[in-house]
Image (spheres, helix red, strand yellow):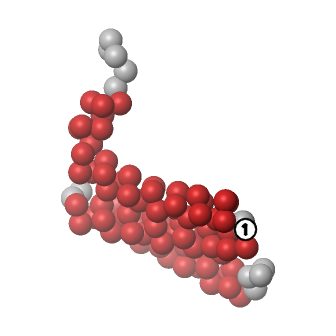
Amino acid sequence: MKPSLLTLTLTWLLLVVLTLTGAGLGDGASPGLILTLIVATITALKGGLVIEEFLEVGGATPGIRYPVRIFGLLVPLCMVLVYLYGPQIAQFTRLAGG
């Protein structure tokens, strides 16, 4: 089912608020696990809104719907993993001989 103009507008406004919140946090907060978790949560919320309301994957076949939704959750998870294990990930993914 196609979302109404009101739903799309409210979703867009929420995305703007979440974006400004993230920008405000990035501008004034000190880095740490709590900030990373907050930013990852905002990213997951924004991704979910875009996936569900603008990409309309709810009406897609499961072969498209589930991978797109999983991707939307993997991005914030990777943000947290990079914060927790950044040096190990960098070592693991570095090019040999450099």
Residue depicted at 39% across the width and 69% down the height? 41
Q: Identify the residue at horizontal 24%, vertical 57% (top origin).
A: 31
Look at 54% across and 79% down and name the residue there.
14
Residue carrying label 1: 60
Q: Quadrant of the N terminus?
A: bottom right
- Please indicate, yes or no, whether residue 75 appears anywhere in the rendered image: yes
Of the pair 26 and 65, the residue shown nearer to us: 65
User: In the image, residue 33 lies at what x, y percent?
Assistant: 22, 61
Position above or below: 6 against 80: below
Amino acid on which the number 1 mark rests in the picture: Ala
Quadrant of the image occupied by residue 96: top left
Q: Quadrant of the C terminus?
A: top left
Residue found at the very far front of the displayed protein: 62
Res. 48 image quadrant: bottom right
Query: Camera-side residue: 48 or 67?
Result: 67
For the residue labelled by badge 1, is the local secondary structure a helix, a strand or a loop?
A: loop
Residue at 38%, 52% in the rendered image: 78
Left or right: 31, with 93 as reference point:
left
Q: Quadrant of residue 10?
A: bottom right
- Residue 89's place in the image compared with 20, above or below, is above
Task: Return the x and y of residue 46 as percentages of the image width and height.
Answer: 52, 69
Answer left or right for 19 relative to 94: right
Residue 9: where, in percent of width, then height?
Answer: 68, 81
Measuring from the top left, give residue 25's x and y in whole percent.
34, 66
